[in-house]
Image (cartoon, rainbow, N blue to C red):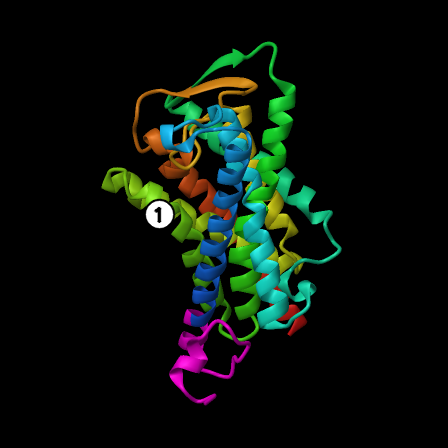
Amino acid sequence: MKESIIYKLSPFNNYDDMPAPILVLKKLLAFFICFVLGMLAGNGVIIGIMIACGKDLSKGETFSDNVMSLLGLYCMAAIIAFSILYWKLIEKRKLSEMGVTKHIGNWFIGALISMGLLAVCVAAIMLTGSIRFYGVLGDPNVKMILLMLGGFVIQGAAEEFLCRGLVLCSLKDRVPLPVAVAASTLSFIYPHWSTLREFEPLYIFSGLLNLAVISCVFSFLTIRTKNIWAACGLHSIWNFCLSCVLGLNLSGSEGASTVLIDMRSAGANILNGGAYGIESSIIADIIIAVLAVMTGYMAIRKNRQEV
């Protein structure tokens, strides 16, 4: 039975004595299952909350855009839950092997890297005149901003638990490292594809390149630090600052209505990423690619030293 291709591909067992391509496909199937179950559970919670609050869904009644955004972010905790359950019940492995270690301080290192990276990207785009600064907004809604921060912390962690924890960490010691990083990148691109594909081909290409290089940064940080916390910090704070601090478009979604700084794209072009945002900017692609090379060098060097 253990030799059958169906058994090998099934994500509902921890059997991993198989060729690398089959093992990679198996882990991608596990990613897909946890992602879908997490999204279904999260959306179920949101629907339950709306019904409990007296919203008539048949008439299209919902909460305000801000509240719906918050619910969407916080309910991504369901993805984290399914990722952990899969790791413990199916993989039957320790959370530390998933990159969930006690070194949570690395989250703040990732957050600092994120702020520096975003500052360089935005400054470089501003030099071309494709993003303009209109000043600091007065009387910000601090409560809403803090709530959004908490939501983005969960959202970033959810994607990293899946892509870096479940996929990368389960593969990096069993297949060649480039293969593990590539599999993690494919899993990272999947949730963003439905939005990205709605744009023009030039923005799709640049957006895919951006997703690939930033995913490599997340993966190399995970390998270098031996945990997923730095990747979580970088991911969450990038999204939060881009949307809630600068008010720029985030992965095709308009910036949050509650922001600290008034910045806007000047027209739509490949320099600022158009309506998709700077994550489809060729300038951001180049800058993040440089960071990917740097973190990749450090990760590979440390890996070779340990070997």
* Amino acid at circle 1: Trp
- Judging depth in this view, the residue of 97 and 238 nearest the camera is 97
Does 137 sit above or below residue 58?
above
Residue displayed at 51% across by 25% down: 66
Q: Quadrant of the N terminus?
A: bottom left
Q: Position of residue 70 (x, y in %)?
A: 54, 32
- Within the magenta stretch, is there residue 16? yes
Q: Which residue has dot 1 on it?
A: 193
- Within the magenta stretch, is there residue 94? no
- Judging depth in this view, the residue of 82 and 183 nearest the camera is 82
* Crowd band around label 1 with a 10 angstrom C-alpha radius: few (<14), some (14–19), many (20+): some
Q: Position of residue 285 (x, y in %)?
A: 41, 42
Local SS, label 1: helix
Location of residue 144 by image quarter: top right
Residue displayed at 45% across by 53% down: 188
Does 187 sit above or below residue 9?
above
Q: Position of residue 71 (x, y in %)?
A: 54, 35
Q: Quadrant of the C terminus?
A: bottom right
Residue 295 visible in rendering = no
Residue displayed at 59% across by 36% down: 151
For residue 265, side relative to residue 220 (left or right): left
For residue 37, side relative to residue 96 (left or right): left
Looking at the rendering, the stretch of residues picked out in magenta corresponds to 1-25
Q: Position of residue 298 (x, y in %)?
A: 59, 57
Residue displayed at 53% across by 56% down: 162
